[in-house]
Amino acid sequence: MTMTEMLEATIARHAELQANEPNRNIWFCGKTFEIDGVGKVWCGIQDVAGVYQKRRHWRRTWEMNGKRIAASKLAQIIKA
C-alpha cells in the first residue's frame, strides 16, 4: 500500500465520520494500516482550513510502530 492510498483511505474515513454526524465538525481523523515487513503505520489528518480561512487542506502526520516519522523517511521505508 502506498502513502497516497493510505492518505486517501484516511480522508474517506473522515468523510464517512462527517456524514454520520453532520452537525458536528470533525477536525482530526486517523487510520492505522498493517504493512508486511514494516509493521503498523498510522496516518493522521487535521483539517486546518477553518483556522486560517483558506481553502480546505490537511495537515498530515505519520507514525510507524507508535513513533512519529517524517513522510520522506516513511516513503523510503515502504518504497512508495
Image: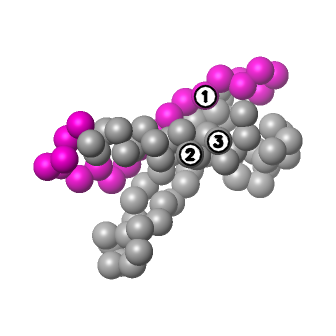
Q: Nearer the viewer, mark 3 or mark 1?
A: 3
Q: Which residue is mark 3?
A: 5
The local crowd at label 3, few if under 14, some if 14 to 19, many if 20 or more residues have their Cα within 10 Å, is: few
Residue 61 seen from this side: yes
State the SS at label 3.
Answer: helix
Label annotation for residue 43: none
Where is residue 54 shown, x and y percent of the image?
A: 39, 78
Question: Which one is earlier in the sequence, the residue at label 1 or at label 2?
Answer: 2
Give the spatial CA distance, label 3 vs label 1: 11 Å
Question: Residue at left 50%, top 34%?
Answer: 31
The amino acid sitting under disc 2 is Glu
Q: Which residue is mark 2?
A: 8
The colour scheme applied to this rendered structure is one colour
Q: Is residue 10 left or right of residue 36?
A: left
The local crowd at label 1, few if under 14, some if 14 to 19, many if 20 or more residues have their Cα within 10 Å, is: some
Q: Which residue is mark 1?
A: 33
State the SS at label 1.
Answer: strand
- The segment highlighted magenta reads 20-39
- Along the viewing direction, whichever of 74 and 57 lies nearer the viewer: 57
**Badge 3 vs badge 2, beta-carbon distance below 8 Å:** yes
The amino acid sitting under disc 1 is Phe
Q: Is residue 25 left or right of residue 23?
A: right
The local crowd at label 2, few if under 14, some if 14 to 19, many if 20 or more residues have their Cα within 10 Å, is: few
Q: Is residue 36 left or right of residue 55?
A: right
Question: Residue at left 73%, top 40%?
Answer: 2
State the SS at label 2.
Answer: helix
Question: Residue at left 35%, top 38%?
Answer: 16
User: Is 64 above or below relative to 39?
Assistant: below
The amino acid sitting under disc 3 is Glu
Where is residue 68 shown, x and y percent of the image?
A: 62, 44
